[in-house]
Image (cartoon, rainbow, N blue to C red):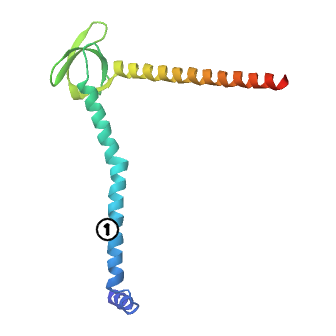
Amino acid sequence: MNTFLLSQMLQQGGGSGSQQGGSYSYIILMVVLVGVMYFMMIRPQKKRQKEEQEMRSSLEIGDEIITIGGIVGKVVTIREEDIVIETGADRTKMKLQRWAVNTNVTKTEQHRKEVEAAREAAKSKKDKKEKQISDSAKEVEEKIEK
């Protein structure tokens, strides 16, 4: 049965010319698929890993952290590959590997406050500009009325 279909394609002109075009389109499709996968999956993952590594390498004494296990503590000592944290009211000290740090709460809060301050500044600037526009419009209306 397969040979019959192949002979039909050859008789209709579906020989080597259309097979080459088909193979080129298949290669192009595969390249596009790999490109889409890179930009949708691989690149964001690498970016996230880089940000986590930067966060872990920028830990400072006094930073409040959360580990991947959910332990909350304050950094007391920093070494090359590990850190020591204090947790709880009784100041229990724990030695952890740097890779176990999930979140730097101190830096996160600081970043959040900076973002809020920037939003407030933008809002006040916008309000000031709107007030200037409305004052200018009132002046124009008063001139027109006179």
Give the residue at the far bottom of this rendering: 11
* Residue depicted at x 31% and y 39%: 47
Which image quarter holds the C terminus? top right
Give the residue at the far left of this rendering: 80
Whole-percent x, y for residue 50 in the image: 28, 35
Number of on-image labels:
1
- Residue 80: image quadrant is top left
In what element is the residue under mark 1?
helix
* Residue depicted at x 38% and y 86%: 14
Amino acid type assigned to the residue bearing label 1 in the image:
Ile
Closer to the camera, 105 or 20?
20
Give the residue at the far right of this rendering: 146
Position of residue 91 relative to residue 138, above or below, is: above
Closer to the camera, 53 or 91?
53
Whole-percent x, y for residue 121 in the image: 52, 20
Closer to the camera, 123 or 62?
123
- Residue 24: image quadrant is bottom left
**Residue 100 horizontal side relative to residue 128, left or right:** left
**Residue 119 horizontal side relative to residue 20, left or right:** right
- Residue 11: image quadrant is bottom left
Position of residue 108 relative to residue 11, above or below, is: above
Which image quarter holds the N terminus? bottom left
* Residue depicted at x 39% and y 89%: 13
Counting other residues with Cα less than 10 Å from the Cα at mark 1, is it few (<14), some (14-19), or many (20 or more)?
few
Residue tagged by mark 1?
27
Whole-percent x, y for residue 124 in the image: 57, 20
Position of residue 54 relative to residue 15, above or below, is: above
Whole-percent x, y for residue 82 in the image: 17, 22
